[in-house]
Amino acid sequence: MSESAAEKIQTIETPEGTFTLRLVQDDLGDIYPGMIRYTVDVLRGTKSVYAYAINTYESARQGTLFDTRKAAEIVFTRLAHDVASRPHLYTRPRVFTRPLPGTGTADVVILQGSPRRFGNSAKIASWCDDEAARAGLTSRVFHLQEMEIRPCIGCYVCYDQGYCPVEDDMPPIIRALEAASVVVVCTPVYTGTVPAALKAAIDRCQWLHAREKVLGKEVHARGLLVAVAGRRGAEPFVCVTRVVEMFMENLGIRPAAPVLIGDLDRARDVETIGGVEDDVRAALSALLAPRDEE
Ligand SMILES: Cc1cc2nc3c(=O)[nH]c(=O)nc-3n(C[C@H](O)[C@H](O)[C@H](O)COP(=O)(O)O)c2cc1C
């Protein structure tokens, strides 16, 4: 239930008790400029039994036929009618924010972005997995290409109640990221940036940003990017490092210096480049060591 003052209140006496409907306006301008969320709460006595929410970023443009506040008011009127005519349907609370399914949390969460299951990024992910185990920590590798991860549809519904309406394999990833102490992204450079499955997962993590802002589920993890590229030098990594940095910044994950491994068109196999495995393990193990929170 929203804590803000109600803009509109209606009390309905029914054989199932007294119900109160509240229309609440929340200013979410600290998340996005001009974002307003309207919530219609239905209370039975003092207990919230149903909530509907909608925000101004869900509609394309101000001044079009779709008016967010009007939509909330229509829902308010319809709910008032429904509560009065079918109060028995509102005797028990309905779940507003569905719990994230799955139990798979881990200390170290590794997002593996390459479609090549036995390629360089997958090898690096396995080193990180092993390094976590050596430190006595739990870890989990998500091979993103093997999961069903649909692109973000930009509906902004996650800012209503902290849940994404797109149904696919994202919930366990969100759950794992929310609980992780360290997040590692292992990825090849694809056409200057990250492969499509990783980009889709990154965009869908807007949901986690919304959970942080709406539900106060803060992520306190440290982050590490390990990227591989076919070409030599720093240039292939310019975009990848920025994309992954933005992903981490958006979620409050504090990134360490990335490990960037180029020239793989020549070497082919990351294991043949001397010292690289040690560099990756050292970069991760520096994040796994117990530290006083800064
Ligand atoms: C579709 C595609 C696009 C690529 N684009 C780039 C690129 O822009 N720059 C680069 O240096 N390497 C590029 N590469 C090379 C890969 O980054 C390189 O082969 C890497 O080692 C593959 O890692 P993996 O084994 O983890 O899949 C590309 C490879 C593919 C398949």
Image: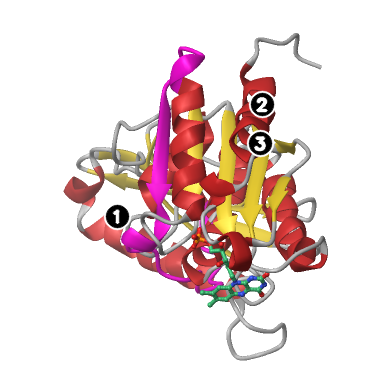
Neighbours of disc 3 within 10 Å: few (<14), some (14-19), many (20+): few
Residue 88 in view of the camera: yes
Q: Are marks 2 and 3 in contact (CB under 8 Å)?
A: no
Q: Residue at x 66, y 69 (%)?
A: 193
11 to 197, vertically: above or below: above
Decide which of tag 3 and tag 1 comes sooner along the chain.
1
Which residues, given as a range, are shown in magenta? 133-160
Which quadrant of the structure image shows residue 253? top right
Q: Which residue is denoted by mark 3 in the rendering?
A: 275
User: Which label lies toward us, 2 or 3?
Assistant: 3
Disc assigned to residue 282: 2
The reply, left or right, for residue 4 in relation to residue 116 is: right
Amino acid carrying mark 3 in the image: Gly
Amino acid carrying mark 1 in the image: Val
Q: Residue at x 74, y 46 (%)?
A: 249
Disc assigned to residue 83: 1
Give the total of numbered labels. Answer: 3
Q: CA distance from mark 3 to mark 1?
A: 68 Å
179 within the magenta span: no
142 within the magenta span: yes
Q: Residue 57: percent from the left, percent from the top? A: 64, 70
State the residue in front, 10 or 147: 147
Q: CA distance from mark 2 to mark 1?
A: 61 Å
Neighbours of disc 1 within 10 Å: few (<14), some (14-19), many (20+): many
Disc assigned to residue 199: none
